[in-house]
């Protein structure tokens, strides 16, 4: 802190003590006293367990569960506000809602994905995003609430949010020249451009009936020999 204070004086910059906070980052599981006193300009700073930096909520464990909860809650509020004008028989249609989802909700959910993507390996974090996508998919497809999440993605023509998160991370690494070992990214294709089932290569099945028949006769011969031996005894 002495170096920071000296740097601010040399550059004629003054820190606001009331708006400044500090956070201790540690992944240790053992219980210990984590409250310390830090002063700047002879004033004590407030200790926090999470901070918002460049739109990302960073916690003291780097788990990013707080960020995922925050973005999921913000997206849910936006979807509920859209529900007033997206009724079953009137209001915003499928195309308009899909545009809003791709242009407003999806960027909010995927912001900074390369930073917190590792947190998606936990089930409770994945469920938060799946629930948000389920809400907007119901509005887009005008489907029943009992429809499964997988079926809603098909009806709404949207990529599952977990796969979409992986794509965003892969695209980032590819743009930085680090995508040599990353599998190719699947692009979204409109339904009219989907391949026809007739054009899909047919599956060639091998007929192993003769081999199975030979094994059956061989098994019968072995069984007959065993019966003959037991009768002879």
Image (tube, rainbow, N blue to C red):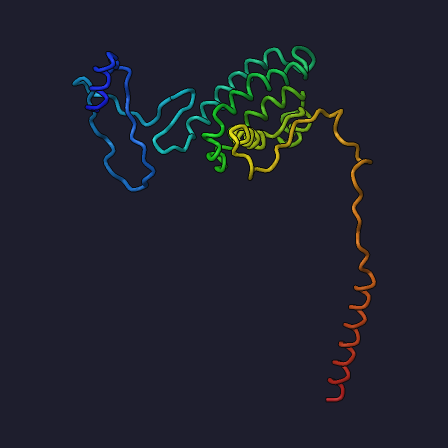
Q: Position of residue 213 (x, y in %)?
A: 82, 65
Residue farthest along the bottom direction in this orientation: 233
> Is 18 left, or right, of 86 in this rendering?
left
Furthest residue to the left? 42
Residue 173 % position (x, y): 52, 31
Number of numbered discs:
0
Q: Tell me residue 2's x, y (percent).
A: 19, 23
Q: Is residue 196 left or right of residue 79?
A: right
Q: Is residue 36 visible?
A: yes
- Residue 130 in view in this figure: no
Identify which residue, 79 or 183, lies in the foreground.
183
Q: Residue at x 46, y 34 (%)?
A: 119
Identified at 78% across, 38% down, the residue is 200
Which quarter of the figure is the N terminus placed in? top left
Left or right: 23 in relation to 134: left
Q: Nearer the viewer, residue 207 or 232?
A: 207
122 or 191: nearer the eye? 191
98 lies above or below 68:
above
Which residue is drawn at the image coordinates 70% and 13% (left, top)?
A: 89
Q: Residue at x 77, y 81 (%)?
A: 225
Q: Quadrant of the C terminus?
A: bottom right
Residue 198: x percent and y percent?
82, 36
Residue 126 in the image: above or below residue 17: below
Residue 157 falls in image quadrant: top right
- For the residue pair 96 and 202, the one nearer the viewer reads as 202
**Quadrant in the rendering for residue 4:** top left
């Amino acid at each position: 802190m002495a170096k920071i204070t000296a740097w601010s004086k040399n550059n004629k910059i003054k820190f606001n003590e009331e708006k400044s906070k500090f956070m201790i980052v540690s992944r240790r599981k053992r219980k210990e006293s984590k409250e310390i006193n830090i002063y700047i300009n002879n004033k004590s700073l407030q200790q926090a367990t999470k901070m918002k930096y460049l739109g990302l909520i960073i916690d003291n464990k780097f788990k990013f569960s707080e960020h995922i909860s925050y973005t999921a809650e913000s997206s849910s509020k936006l979807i509920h506000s859209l529900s007033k004008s997206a009724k079953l028989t009137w209001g915003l249609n499928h195309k308009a809602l899909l545009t809003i989802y791709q242009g407003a909700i999806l960027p909010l959910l995927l912001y900074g994905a390369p930073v917190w993507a590792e947190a998606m390996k936990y089930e409770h974090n994945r469920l938060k995003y799946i629930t948000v996508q389920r809400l907007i998919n119901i509005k887009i497809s005008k489907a029943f609430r009992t429809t499964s999440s997988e079926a809603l993605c098909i009806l709404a023509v949207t990529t599952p949010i977990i796969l979409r998160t992986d794509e965003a991370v892969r695209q980032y690494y590819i743009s930085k020249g680090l995508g040599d070992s990353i599998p190719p990214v699947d692009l979204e294709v409109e339904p009219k451009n989907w391949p026809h089932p007739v054009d899909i290569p047919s599956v060639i099945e091998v007929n192993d009936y003769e081999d199975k028949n030979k094994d059956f006769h061989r098994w019968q011969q072995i069984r007959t020999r065993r019966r003959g031996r037991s009768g002879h005894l």
